[in-house]
Image (cartoon, helix red, strand yellow):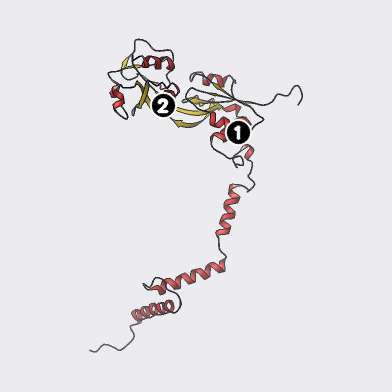
Amino acid sequence: MTGSEVSPSFRLVYVPGATPAKWARIWNERLPDVPIELVQVPAADAPGVLREGAADAGLVRLPVDRTFFSAIPLYTETTVVIVPKGHLVTAADEVSLEDLADEVVFHPLDDVLGWERPPGEPAFERPATTEDAVELVAAGVGLLVVPQSLARLHHRRDLTYRPVVDAPQSSVALAWPEERTTDLVDDFIGIVRGRTVNSTRGRGGARTPEGSQDERTGAADARRKPAAGKSTGRAGKATTTRAGSGGSGGSRGGRGAKGAKGARTNKETKGTKRGRPRRP
């Protein structure tokens, strides 16, 4: 390596609540010579970091500007209400927004649910962060509605949470600037989508040792397709067996032939009406 060459690296930003550790571990196994750097940023800042080129890709909260970013939605979170243990809300397995109508519900400045108006009674002022709001909930001042991952992130022993069935939800996606879709971004996309190392959809459309999917499918069809003569023999045998089964379960040998003969005799009798003429 010359002094002007720089070792490649991959920088991934992620919002609070997102968990990139599993994908980072797979990255390190597959690309041990390319370090991956994980940087947590506030949800509102993630798109700006990507626009500025300070990261290659990011785990962000939707929506994002789809005229600039490519995005792969990953999952949609359950929305929950954080309450003190022993609160009346904990008597139910899940609640609705109407159940929170008489409660003070905090609306932090870094809220990610995009409320037009949060449920319940508004607090005297908006907490600066979700973490600040959680502290106020622990003090018994009010409640907080957030995506479940944030409730887990700010878990405390004196707090618990319950799902809110009719609240807005937040979705997490992998996003990157469309014009900067690099080979390393493609590698990370493959990891997130669960592709194997030898996937046919890997970088550059590389084929697996077994050949392409179309080739494998064609070979399988060829194996399943019987020879013409052999097929005709099977068809004839099957037809004879069905004709001669006559309720005997498709028996073979003499009984099958006898049944077939009987079927032909019945058909001829019905069409020709052989035998003695009826007496007048």
Q: Mark 2 is on which residue type?
A: Gln
Left or right of residue 31: residue 251: left
- Whole-percent x, y for residue 258 in the image: 41, 80
Q: Is 210 or 160 nearer to us in this picture?
A: 160
Q: Quadrant of residue 185?
A: top right
Mark 1 / mark 2, whichever is N-terminal: 2
Q: Above or below — where is 221 with respect to 202?
A: below
* Residue 187 image label: 1
For the residues bearing labels 1 and 2, Cβ distance under 8 angstroms: no
Q: What residue is at 57 percent from the left and 28 percent from the top?
A: 178
Q: What residue is at 41 percent from the left and 26 percent from the top?
A: 148
Q: Quadrant of the N terminus?
A: top right
Q: Nearer the viewer, mark 1 or mark 2?
A: 2
Task: Report the residue marked by disc 2.
Answer: 148
Q: Mark 1 is on which residue type?
A: Asp
- Whole-percent x, y for residue 73 in the image: 48, 31
* Residue lying farthest to the front in this orientation: 157
* Residue lying farthest to the top in this orientation: 124
* Residue lying farthest to the left in this orientation: 280
Left or right of residue 110: residue 99: left
Q: Quadrant of residue 11?
A: top right
Q: Residues within 10 Å of mark 1 (few under 14, many from 20)?
A: some
Disc 1 to disc 2, C-alpha distance: 29 Å
* Residue 209 image label: none
Q: Is 67 or 168 nearer to us in this picture?
A: 168
